């Protein structure tokens, strides 16, 4: 039997613990007959591990090279940690087995507003002018939080290598808005909301 890919295993968890049917009000102000709370999965022990590997596989499949991964708090927080830890773990394993050390992705988080105390920074963690970085988010509807993060890293002098979301809702012109803000950097997704819905229904059958 073929072992399911990291993405396939992640989809199964998303459909089981993060997807709900009903009537919901979205952060965008609209309403929907379903809701995907990705944080239930990205903060799950196995779900977080799978998130890190699935995102990393997506980046490698698309030939994306970067120095760090980050996004707007708080939907991006567990994704950033998962991806950074997975790359660090792979590097440690390589060293232990005497193999060439693969590149790692550092992590950073973007505050919704600058700190009013201390250093007053908006970006926490990795922050180096000229670096190529990947912006991540859990769910893309309007793309507002993703665009917010893109603008913040550009203001810090970093370059957006790619944008990744776990689930794209495919509505409210989210993709065109993100692609315009990304200025040529690819917008990648692991799943559409319909993918998660279909898997949820399959599991309920």
Image (spheres, rainbow, N blue to C red):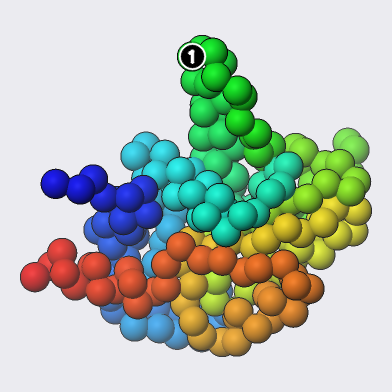
* Numbered-mark total: 1
Identity of the residue drawn at 37% across and 54% down: 7
- Front-lying residue, 81 or 159: 159
In which quadrant is the C terminus drawn? bottom left
Q: Left or right? Give the position of 95 relative to 132.
A: left
Residue 2: percent from the left, percent from the top? 20, 48
The image shows residue 174, relative to residue 156, as above or below, that is below
The vertical placement of 11 against 201, above or below, is: above
- Residue at the spot x=60%, y=23% of the render? 100
In this picture, residue 128 sits left or right of residue 82: right
The answer to whether residue 31 of the structure is visible from this angle is yes
Q: Residue furthest left?
A: 205
Mark 1 — residue? 97
Q: Which quarter of the figure has residue 104? A: top right
Q: Tell me the residue at 54%/76% (across/down).
A: 141
Residue that protrudes farthest toward the front in the picture: 99
Q: Is residue 115 visible?
A: no
Q: Is residue 151 above or below residue 111?
A: below
Q: Residue placed at 71% from the left, 43% from the top?
A: 68
40 sits to left or right of 29? left
x, y percent for residue 98: 54, 13
Q: Nearer the viewer, residue 57 or 165?
A: 57
SS class, disc 1: loop
The front one of 14 and 116 is 14
How packed mark 1 is, by other alpha carbons closer than 10 Å (few <14, some 14-19, many 20 or more), is: few
* Residue 92 image point, x, y percent: 55, 20
Q: Position of residue 4 (x, y in %)?
A: 26, 50
């Amino acid at each position: 039997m073929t072992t399911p890919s990291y993405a396939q295993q992640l989809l199964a968890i998303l459909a089981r613990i993060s997807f709900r049917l009903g009537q919901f009000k979205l952060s965008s102000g609209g309403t929907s007959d379903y809701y995907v709370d990705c944080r239930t999965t990205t903060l799950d022990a196995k779900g977080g591990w799978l998130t890190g590997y699935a995102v990393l596989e997506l980046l490698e499949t698309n030939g994306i090279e970067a120095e760090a991964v980050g996004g707007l708090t708080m939907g991006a927080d567990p994704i950033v940690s998962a991806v950074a830890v997975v790359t660090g773990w792979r590097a440690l394993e390589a060293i232990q087995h005497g193999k060439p050390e693969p590149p790692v992705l550092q992590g950073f988080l973007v505050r919704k507003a600058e700190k009013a105390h201390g250093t007053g920074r908006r970006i926490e963690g990795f922050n180096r002018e000229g670096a190529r970085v990947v912006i991540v988010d859990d769910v893309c509807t309007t793309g507002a939080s993703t665009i917010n993060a893109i603008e913040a890293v550009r203001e810090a002098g970093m370059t957006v290598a790619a944008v990744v979301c776990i689930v794209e809702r495919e509505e409210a012109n989210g993709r065109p808005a993100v692609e315009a803000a990304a200025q040529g950097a690819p917008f990648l997704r692991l799943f559409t909301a319909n993918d998660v819905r279909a898997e949820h229904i399959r599991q309920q059958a």
